[in-house]
Image: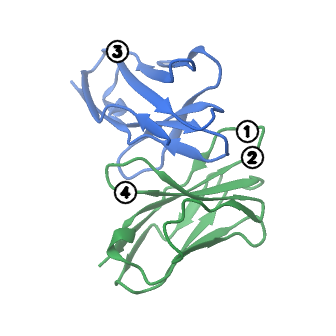
Chain colours: A green, B blue
Amino acid sequence: GAGVSQSPRYKVAKRGQDVALRCDPISGHVSLFWYQQALGQGPEFLTYFQNEAQLDKSGLPSDRFFAERPEGSVSTLKIQRTQQEDSAVYLCASSLGDLDYEQYFGPGTRLTVT
Amino acid sequence: GQNIDQPTEMTATEGAIVQINCTYQTSGFNGLFWYQQHAGEAPTFLSYNVLDGLEEKGRFSSFLSRSKGYSYLLLKELQMKDSASYLCAVRGNTDKLIFGTGTRLQVFP
């Protein structure tokens, strides 16, 4: 497909479980962003990659959150020991890089922690 | 701190014009974006302003005043499908976007 894809689309986890959320950016896009969107709120920045380098992780809420992009393409956001407050939609976005300012968003993964 | 304000909800009638305002205070400024987000879907790009003035794209226009920290999104000839949330986002000193809470627009027949 031509767009950003994310999987799974929906994830239900019991409190304390680890989860892994995947993002496939648009082919050739250098920059990749993860955002967290709570119900009725705007997306909040979590972390940012340029190729495989994680340039900014200032938005990760705790050390239970970890993201990687080892080959500069697919990225995984991992949440360890999930808590109820982690319930949200996790959005991934990609862009070509410095000369292309538009970020293209994926459909998101809706995480529900019970 | 960094702050982006926009109204929480607005309503309008099909065929009318609506203006959604956004004010911002951020560390640095490298552009303001408007995104549309239908319930349960991904945000989709509408417009980008980095210089003062009006950018027009079909039924949608966006205005920016950097000195006032102010932008608006103007939607003309409203259609039922325009019912959605409209997100104002600013790129500050880094590449990340800082989003407002979004304005939920309901269009009535």
Q: Residue at x 37, y 16 (%)?
A: B77
Kindly check if marks 4 and 2 are in contact, taking CB atoms under 8 A apart as contact.
no
Rendered location of residue A11, percent (x, y): 41, 74
CA gap, disc 1 and disc 4: 27 Å
The amino acid on which the numbered mark 4 sits, given as a three-letter code, is Ala
Q: Which residue is mark 3?
A: B17
| Label 3 vs label 1, nearer the camera | 1
CA gap, disc 3 and disc 2: 34 Å
Mark 4 is surrounded, within 10 Å at the Cα level, by few (under 14), some (14 to 19) or many (20 or more) other residues, namely: some
Q: Secondary structure at mark 1?
A: loop
* Label located before the other in sequence (1 or 4): 4
CA gap, disc 4 and disc 3: 29 Å
Rendered location of residue B73, percent (x, y): 45, 23
Mark 3 is surrounded, within 10 Å at the Cα level, by few (under 14), some (14 to 19) or many (20 or more) other residues, namely: some
* Label located before the other in sequence (4 or 2): 4
Q: Which residue is mark 1?
A: A100
Q: Residue at x 55, y 64 (%)?
A: A6
